[in-house]
Structures are given as C-alpha cells and as structure tokens.
Image: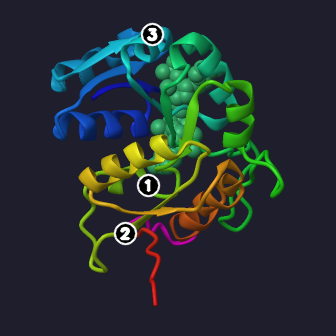
Amino acid sequence: MKVGILGSGGVAKTLAAGFVKHGHDVMLGTRTPAKLADWSKQHPGARVGSFAEAAAFGETIVLAVKGGVASEALRAAGAPNLAGKTVMDATNPIADAPPVNGVLKFFTSLDDSLMERLQREFAAARFVKVFNSVGQALMINPQLKGGKPTMFICGNDEAAKKMVTAVLDQFGWETADMGRAEAARAIEPLCMLWCIPGLTRNQWSHAFKLIQA
Ligand SMILES: NC(=O)c1ccc[n+]([C@@H]2O[C@H](COP(=O)([O-])OP(=O)(O)OC[C@H]3O[C@@H](n4cnc5c(N)ncnc54)[C@H](OP(=O)(O)O)[C@@H]3O)[C@@H](O)[C@H]2O)c1
C-alpha cells in the first residue's frame, strides 16, 4: 500500500517506520521537508515531501498533525488529493490551555468531535479515527503483559474501516469498531484518560483492552 502521512512529529515518524516495517511505501508530508533530512537518512524506505505531495502519493492517508491545525494541514494537502481515500485520523483536539490535575483540555465538547468536523469539511474523504488513544511508543506491535491491546476505531465508511482493521492486525492490535463518525466524541477523550497516569505519575506504558464476556 502507498501511504501518505501528513505530519513530521513523533506520531508521524513512528507510524511511518511501522508501515515501512510491514512492507508499505511511505511518504511523510510537512511544511518544511528539510527538517526531516536526518530522519530520512536513517529511514531510507520513507520519502519526504510537502503535505500536497504526500497526499497525492498516498492511496491511503494518515493524519498526524496537531489537532488545532488539522483542518489547515488538510487544506494544504488539497481536497482533491484526499477524495475517495481512507484518512486514518490519529489527531486529538487538545486545547492550548494546560491540563488540570493531569486532565487535558479539549477544544471540542462532548456533542462534537474533531473527526466529525474534518469529515464535514472534507466530505469526499473517508475518515477513520485510529491511533489516538495510545502513546506513540506503543503504536507498533506493542508487547504488553495483558496481551494484545484494543484500538477503538470509528467512521462512516465500512470498507475504510475494514482496511484500517487489516493495518491494525499487522501492527499487533485488536480492533473494536464503535460505529459511525459520532463515536469519535467518545474515542477522542480516551486520549485524556490515557494521559492521566503519564501527566500525574509519569507512567506512560499502558494501553486499553476491551474484555468480552
Ligand atoms: N504524541 C503521542 O504520543 C500521540 C499519541 C496519539 C495521538 N497523538 C495525536 O497525534 C497528532 C500528532 O502528534 P505529534 O505529537 O506527533 O505531533 P504534534 O507536535 O502534535 O504536531 C506536529 C505536526 O503538526 C504540524 N503543524 C503544526 N502547526 C501547523 C500549521 N499551522 N499548519 C499545518 N501543520 C502544522 C507540524 O507540521 P510541520 O511538519 O509542517 O511542522 C507537524 O507535522 C496530534 O493531534 C496528537 O494529539 C499524539
């Protein structure tokens, strides 16, 4: 699969390395490709370009930019470059205000989510919420005492979610499909919950698991 990853931060680089490890072709997109020159040398399997070049390159897109600028980054990528493609949305709507007792502030409400906003603005893209509820260090084939962790996903397109489930299988995750885009109102705040042990006790080595009867 050709994967265009929008972003140059820790999540973008981690997922890029994960896709390369599992045999996919990757291009990272950023406003300043030069800043990834060193990273590029260490990861010869991955290309680097602008947001638009990465989006045009990808048959599938990963969105891994700061939540508050997600819309801006997608506009730079170009709506025609996203049309019909699955967009794996790893973003969280974290506000600039500091956390309170380890609880992050969001700029969305519980009756809204960042992914729904993006899905409305880029209606021809097929957004799937994924990778937002775990730290980057555990995204690729995590080895945890409790076995395979669960990744909660949602989105309006069944074929897109099927493809994302196949990626999660490769990356060592169980998938829990929570339904349509509105479920992002519940999945995005899992980031708040996940970060509390980190922000209050510096513990970051955990992931969620859904236990079935
Ligand atoms: N860190 C984690 O462990 C983790 C885990 C799960 C989910 N997430 C979520 O994943 C996303 C990425 O997180 P991150 O920590 O890797 O990186 P980040 O620091 O949140 O974001 C960095 C990216 O945002 C882009 N950006 C910043 N301002 C921009 C603007 N005005 N216009 C366009 N793009 C802009 C940067 O683009 P340039 O390359 O052009 O500078 C860069 O690619 C976030 O939404 C975060 O909440 C993070």
SS label for mark 2: loop
* Residue 13 painted magenta: no
Q: Which residue lies furthest to the bottom in this view?
A: 213
SS label for mark 3: loop
The residue shown at (24%, 51%) is 170
Task: Mark 1 and ligand 1: say if the CB distance to the nearest ligand atom is below 8 Å.
Answer: yes
Mark nearer the N terminus (1 vs 2): 1
Instruction: Give the residues drawn in magenta, as a range.
Output: 200-205
Closer-to-camera residue (54/102) = 54
In the rendered structure, which amino acid carries the disc numbered 2?
Answer: Pro
Relative placement, left or right, of 152 versus 143 is right
Q: Identify the residue under disc 3.
A: 50
The answer to which quarter of the image holds residue 13 is top left
Contact flag, marks 1 and 2 (Cβ < 8 Å): no
In the rendered structure, which amino acid carries the disc numbered 1?
Answer: Gly
Foreground disc of the pair 2, 3:
2
Q: How far apart are marks 1 and 2 (CA)?
A: 13 Å
Q: Identify the residue under disc 2.
A: 149
- Residue 33, placed above or below residue 95: above
Q: Identify the residue under disc 1.
A: 135
The answer to which quarter of the image holds residue 9 is top left
**Badge 2: few (under 14), some or many (20 or more) residues near its Cα, within 10 Å?**
many
SS label for mark 1: loop
In the rendered structure, which amino acid carries the disc numbered 3?
Answer: Ser
Quarter of the figure with the N terminus: top left
- Residue 56, placed above or below residue 27: above
